[in-house]
Image: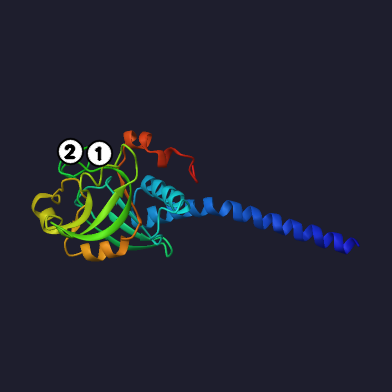
Amino acid sequence: MKKSFLLILLTFGLSIQGFNKMSFNPISNLVVKIELLSNKFSISKEAIKHALNAYEKLKLSGQILNQRYLTIADFSKPSSEKRLFIIDINKMELVLQTLVAHGRNSGTLFAKAFSNKNESYQSSLGFYITGDIYKGKHGMSLQLSGIESGINDNAKKRAIVMHGANYVNNQLIKQQGYIGRSLGCPAVPQNEVKEIIHTIKGASLLYIYAPSNNYTKKSKLINEPALIG
């Protein structure tokens, strides 16, 4: 009888321990991912924290269908640096790192001004869900849906898409110190656009980040209870 009672207690104790570990794993895993990605790939820690929190929330709500990839455009970096990161979340590996343009009225070397208004020719910060591939005036392009109200939800009206551009190249950096600028689109190198678009198409998450207090205050995705503090 005593042996049976001790066995029940031991089993119960192990079950509680297992439950506690499972309960804390999502948070601890996110913290580990943030440190790993920031240190390994030299991405802003704040950008990764925001992106991973939003990724988990949007995945749970069913908005992300292509769950393998997370893309971050880190506009805390100058346009002369490769600041577009496509991350394989399953393998915790960097699939691709390349140049990406910001809007012509957002700044020259750094993107500092942002807008959701039509014909502002500025970039819009925040979270986007990638859509379908289509052929437009820039050739192969990828539809983007801005999902943050008042921040980037005019993306479709403004024709903000991902496309290739001849002004996004290393030669311009050598000549003038920065790449060309778009009308607000996150334009990428022409020789890499096909690979990029085919990788992140079909409802994956794109986060365009810059250290902006105004954005941080307005973003519901960031201000809603986070998985990590």
Q: For the residue labelled by badge 2, is the local secondary structure a helix, a strand or a loop?
A: loop
Q: Residues within 10 Å of mark 2 (few under 14, many from 20)?
A: some
Name the secondary structure under disc 1.
Answer: loop
Location of residue 11 in the rendering, given as x and y in whole percent from the top left corner: 76, 61
| Left or right side of 133 for 129 | right
Q: Say which residue label 1 marks.
A: 116
* Residue sitting farthest toward the left: 175
**Residue kind at label 2, given as amino acid type:** Ser
Labels 1 and 2 touching (C-beta < 8 A): yes
Is residue 10 at all visible to an observer of this figure?
yes
Task: Please determine whether, in this image, residue 154 is positioned above or below residue 136.
Answer: above
**Left or right: 41 with respect to 110?**
right
Question: Residue 139: horizontal and vertical position, in percent?
Answer: 15, 61
Query: Which residue, given by chain and number where applicable, does mark 2 sit on?
Result: 120
Query: Cα distance, mark 1 to mark 2?
Result: 8 Å
Q: Position of residue 112 (x, y in %)?
A: 23, 39
Badge 1 crowding class, 10 Å Cα cut-off, few under 14, some 14 to 19, many 20 or more, is many
Residue 211 is marked as none
